[in-house]
Image: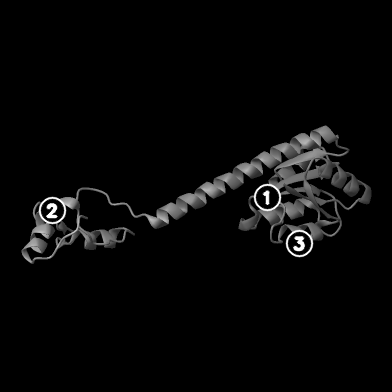
């Protein structure tokens, strides 16, 4: 999975980059808030971001707020890095849209564990989005018929909701996405088609 880093301290930035690569992640490293915000808007942008709270020009919390205002970025998992540990400060970060936070100086095992949670969340969201897409596609291709359909026992015409009688294929063509091709079943061939062909002296073939 691709992870974005937004950290203005060069040493911390490089340390994060090395750790993430060791853990098997693809890394997009940025040095400040504007770079991070731009990277998150790119095509095929990372679905998980580690944002330092205190950065010049645009801090991590403001990046969170901007991300949450964009519907197309709602799936991005945001983890805030901060040296601030007061409850009200943590609440501010979470209310801005961060999914999680980690206090500096962090320990590698804790960061790895929190990233694993983020990866699972992103994967679940992607799986859910795929299921929703599949369902929407299925619903767009199928129109369901409900209730009881009055059908003539002899000619097999169906009475529609306007009290008109119409051919079965016409009715289903209007209410479903089904397309019809006309043929005849073996029983009808033996009882109707074959005798007519025989009467005309036309050699019939088994269907």
Residue 90, percent from left and from top: 76, 40
Which residue is drawn at the image coordinates 41% and 53% (left, top)? 139
Secondary element under disc 1, as helix, strand or loop, is loop
Provide the residue designation for mark 2: 190
Q: Nearer the viewer, residue 41 or 205?
A: 205
Q: Nearer the viewer, residue 182 or 186?
A: 186
Q: Quadrant of residue 124?
A: top right
Secondary element under disc 2, as helix, strand or loop, is helix
Which residue is drawn at the image coordinates 20% and 53% (left, top)? 185
Provide the residue designation for mark 3: 38
Please state if 15 lies on the left or on the right of 191 as rendered: right
Q: Can you name the residue that lies furthest to the left here?
A: 199
In front: label 1 or label 2 = 2
Give the Cα distance between marks 1 and 2: 65 Å
Which residue is drawn at the image coordinates 43% and 52% (left, top)? 138
First of labels 1, 2 by sequence position: 1
Few, some or many residues within 10 Å of mark 3 (<14, 14–19, 20+)? few
């Amino acid at each position: 999975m691709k992870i974005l880093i937004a950290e203005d301290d060069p040493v911390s930035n490089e340390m994060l980059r090395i750790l993430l690569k060791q853990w098997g992640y693809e890394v997009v490293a940025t040095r400040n808030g504007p770079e991070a915000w731009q990277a998150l808007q790119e095509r095929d942008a990372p679905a998980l971001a580690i944002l330092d709270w205190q950065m010049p020009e645009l801090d991590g919390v403001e990046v969170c707020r901007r991300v949450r205002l964009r519907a197309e970025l709602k799936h991005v998992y945001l983890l805030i890095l901060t040296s601030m540990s007061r409850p009200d400060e943590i609440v501010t970060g979470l209310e801005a849209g961060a999914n999680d936070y980690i206090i500096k100086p962090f320990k590698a095992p804790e960061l790895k564990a929190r990233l694993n949670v983020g990866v699972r969340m992103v994967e679940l969201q992607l799986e859910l989005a795929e299921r929703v897409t599949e369902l929407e596609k299925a619903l767009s291709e199928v129109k369901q018929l409900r209730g009881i359909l009055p059908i003539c026992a002899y000619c097999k015409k169906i009475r529609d909701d306007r009290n008109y009688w119409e051919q079965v294929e016409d009715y289903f063509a209007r209410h479903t996405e089904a397309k019809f091709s006309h043929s005849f079943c073996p029983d009808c061939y033996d009882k109707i088609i074959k005798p007519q062909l025989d009467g005309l002296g036309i050699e019939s073939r088994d269907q």
